[in-house]
Image (tube, rainbow, N blue to C red):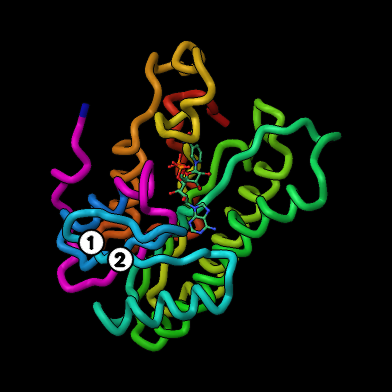
Amino acid sequence: MHDATAMRLQGFDGRVAVVTGAARGIGRRIAETLHAQGAHVAALDVARPEVPGVVGVEADVTDEAGVRAALDEVEARLGPVDVLVLNAGVFVIEPFADVTLDSWRRTQAVNLDGAYLCARRVLPGMQARGHGRVVAIGSSAGITGGSKACAAYAASKGGLMALTKAIAQEYVADGITANAVAPALIRTPMVDAMPDLAARVPVGRLGEPDDVAACVAFLCSDHASYVTGAVLDVNGGFLIH
Ligand SMILES: NC(=O)c1ccc[n+]([C@@H]2O[C@H](COP(=O)([O-])OP(=O)(O)OC[C@H]3O[C@@H](n4cnc5c(N)ncnc54)[C@H](O)[C@@H]3O)[C@@H](O)[C@H]2O)c1
């Protein structure tokens, strides 16, 4: 396997990056990768993340005041936020007929409202400084509707990817890019509950958090300054469209 932290990309020296949902899984690997590129990284999660070299901050992305306080803390400790990775997410398998309004709202609150709250807090500063990178972790389910019964999740991720494109449109003249990655079948606790998945991936293996982290790091780097409003599939050929 490749090692995303071993990449050498330009554009991270002195930059401050925030990764939400970074206590484990894909978010943690993104935080480690951006740190290895030379960024000053803060990892946000519902319990304070412990990632070597990274500032861990406890924050529930659904809580407006909590998001504000967490990002105030990040800026006080590291400086203004240059890079925002919207990774915090929840995934529930539920036949549509069984989706209660509470369950529906919980998924939208984390996956979509959380992204809105974090982006709204940091975009004015990026705009004032004329530079910013926003990368959202979408999902192939947000494109296809999901091959499992996950309507609330699919709707939230479709919304998140559209929000990312809307940010790209509004801030295109401000030095800010906004892109999404759309992973599928990445080996994390989120998919551990679903056995026999590797056989369904055309490249013959599950994805690793490194596969996503490498793409996110590229989109956050100076090399991607001409890329905005894009959705990059990271799915081993599971979905080609
Ligand atoms: N694993 C996959 O195959 C896959 C595929 C497509 C998309 N994704 C997306 O990638 C992202 C990361 O997924 P993962 O597989 O690493 O999952 P994971 O469950 O291992 O990690 C998700 C993290 O988000 C955090 N989180 C949940 N609710 C939060 C909240 N309210 N506030 C702050 N943090 C919160 C969790 O504590 C956890 O650390 C998610 O957005 C997920 O939807 C994953």
Q: Is residue 236 magenta?
A: no
- Judging by the rendered image, the residue that carries numbered circle 2 is 42
Secondary structure of residue under mark 2: strand
Of 74 and 6, the residue lying toward us = 74
Evaluate whether residue 179 shows in this view: no
Q: Which mark is residue 221?
A: none
For image coordinates 81% across by 35% down, the residue present is 96
Q: Are marks 2 and 1 in contact (CB under 8 Å)?
A: yes
Does 26 appear above or below 2?
below
Of 115 and 59, the residue lying toward us = 59
Left or right of 188 on screen, residue 142: right
Left or right of 160 on screen, residue 1: left
| Segment tinted magenta in the rendering | 2-29
**Residue 3 percent across, percent down from the top left:** 19, 37
Of 230 and 33, the residue lying toward us = 33
- Decide which of tag 2 and tag 1 comes sooner along the chain: 2
Q: Residue furthest right?
A: 97
